[in-house]
Image: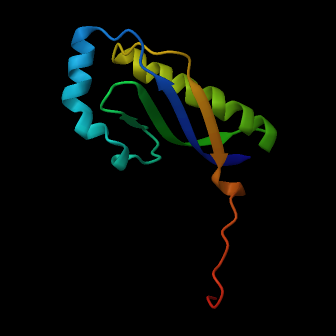
Amino acid sequence: MTRTYRVQVTGQFADLAPTIRARLRAEQAEHDLFLAAFTQEGTFTYTPTLTRFTLRYLLEVVEGSAAEADEAVGVEGELLAIEFLEARSIAHKPLTVSAVCVDDVKVKRRRGTS
């Protein structure tokens, strides 16, 4: 069973080294909230004050059941986020992960449309 998820990993920066802080400030316009999207490679956004950040992923998970996929996607999203942050030497506090299966989302049609 393959299920597609929008995964959001949020966290707070912690004890950033001066060089990392300077790099993040210089690149902040490229990581503005208005550029946020759920992508396979992930989208990294953060506040100009360097307090909070979000990573957004669009992930496909293959598991035996929907319940197993729901559990696995949270772990996968968190591991991807940790890998991303560590590769850039970005110190952070504990992360929070939320996921929504797009296969389960029902779209309401407006009245008068077919």
- Residue 34, x across and y down, in percent: 35, 49
For this view, does 104 lie left or right of residue 60? right
Vertical relation: 86 (above or below) 55 = above
Residue sitting at 35 percent across and 33 percent down? 47
Snapshot quadrant of residue 75? top right
Q: Nearer the viewer, residue 74 or 34?
A: 34
Vertical relation: 43 (above or below) 18 = below
Q: Nearer the viewer, residue 78 or 1?
A: 78
Color theme of the render: rainbow
Residue sitting at 41 percent across and 12 percent down? 91
Residue sitting at 48 percent across and 39 percent down? 56
- Residue 55, x across and y down, in percent: 46, 34
Residue sitting at 34 percent across and 48 percent down? 35
Snapshot quadrant of residue 16? top left
Q: Which quadrant is the C terminus positioned in?
A: bottom right
Count of labels in the image: 0
For this view, does 54 lie left or right of residue 48? right
For this view, does 90 lie left or right of residue 11? left
In the current view of this chain or complex, which residue is farthest to the front? 49
